[in-house]
Image (spheres, helix red, strand yellow):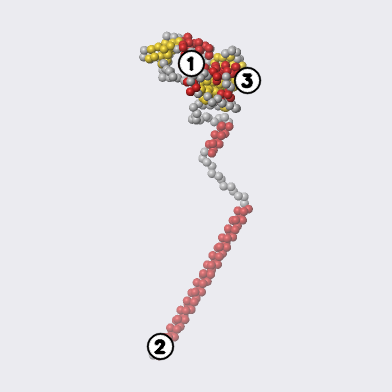
Amino acid sequence: MRKKTILAAAILTIMSGAILCGCGAGSGVNDQSAAQQTQEAQAGETSQAEETAQAEETAQTEEPVQAEEAVPENLHEKQNDDEKQDAGELQETDVEADDASEDFDAQADGDDGYRDYEEPFGEEIQVDADTRRKMNIFLSNFSEAGLNAYDKDNRDLKDILWWAHIWTKINKWKSIEYEDVPGEGTCEKNSFENINKTLDKYLGFTISDDDVAHLNQPDENYWFFCKDGNLYSPAADGESYTLLSIVSDVEDLGENKLKLYFTVYSQDLDAYFDGKDKDEYYGLSADEASSNKELEQYEVGYAVVVSDGSFYKLEHLEIK
């Protein structure tokens, strides 16, 4: 029995030693594998570092590439418009007016108003004070009575008749009669004889009954009508006619024709109703008018006139 016990103990001792040897062998394998993995990782890091260094060296030797700037969507359209404008091909667009009146295309140097550079062109001339005064009075006959456009070859008969009637009210008011007209009430009556005197003096033509036969009823724009050799208009009172014109430049067009550039001014309303005469303004130069505290710039214009040496007749007028 003692022998069996010793033999079992010996067997157990041998088995324990074998197990310990097996564990030691397994630990050695694991340590070898871990070391191999560490070497491979170190090799990978070395390779990656070499690639990074090589890329940086390559970037330093190559020319830098400039990043493309973002282009606004409308830049090419703007460039195209600029090119068209330079070539004179850009179409005009509608623009709201900031002021009560519109200026001409170009402004003259200095303070002498505005000029329209459309044809006809002429040689600029200087005029004396007396001639300038006559020009100012002549042009004021149109601005104060509201005629802003006229062409002798393309007349608007209604505009002309209305201007002649208002001119008579301002300058020959005693010639105006008043009459009750059935269906129209009290009307101002101005004879064609009066009107033709005005037309002939300033425009160089007259009208006949046949010319106005179709104007026997008032319309929505002009509340006057013509009947029995007279012009009738609804009676009005309290109107103000404060406008006057001051010439800034004169061009000689040849054949006794002149082109007059001018500025329209409005007289101070209080001074007007106080009865102050415009006569003292007619002798002003362009510079004097622009600095006069009683005058306010209202519109600008030009006129083509025929001169006989003592008086003028209008051929073309534009006031804007």
- Badge 1 crowding class, 10 Å Cα cut-off, few under 14, some 14 to 19, many 20 or more, is some
Please count the marks in the image: 3
In the rendered image, the residue lying farthest to the front is 274
Location of residue 237 (image quadrant) = top left
Using the numbered discs, state the Cα–Cα distance from disc 3 to disc 2 in whole angstroms: 152 Å
Query: Is residue 157 visible in the rendered structure shown here?
Result: no
Label 2 residue SS: helix
Q: Which residue in the structure is indicated by mark 1? A: 170
**Percent coordinates x, y for residue 52 in the rendering:** 58, 58
Mark 3 element type: loop
Residue 222 screen position, x and y as percent: 43, 18
User: Which amino acid type corresponds to the residue marked 2 in the rendered image?
Assistant: Thr
Q: Secondary structure at mark 1?
A: helix
- Report the residue marked by disc 3: 126
Evaluate if marks 3 and 2 touch, with contact meaning CB atoms under 8 Å apart.
no
Q: CA distance from mark 1 to mark 2?
A: 156 Å
Residue in view at x 50 percent, y 72 percent: 30
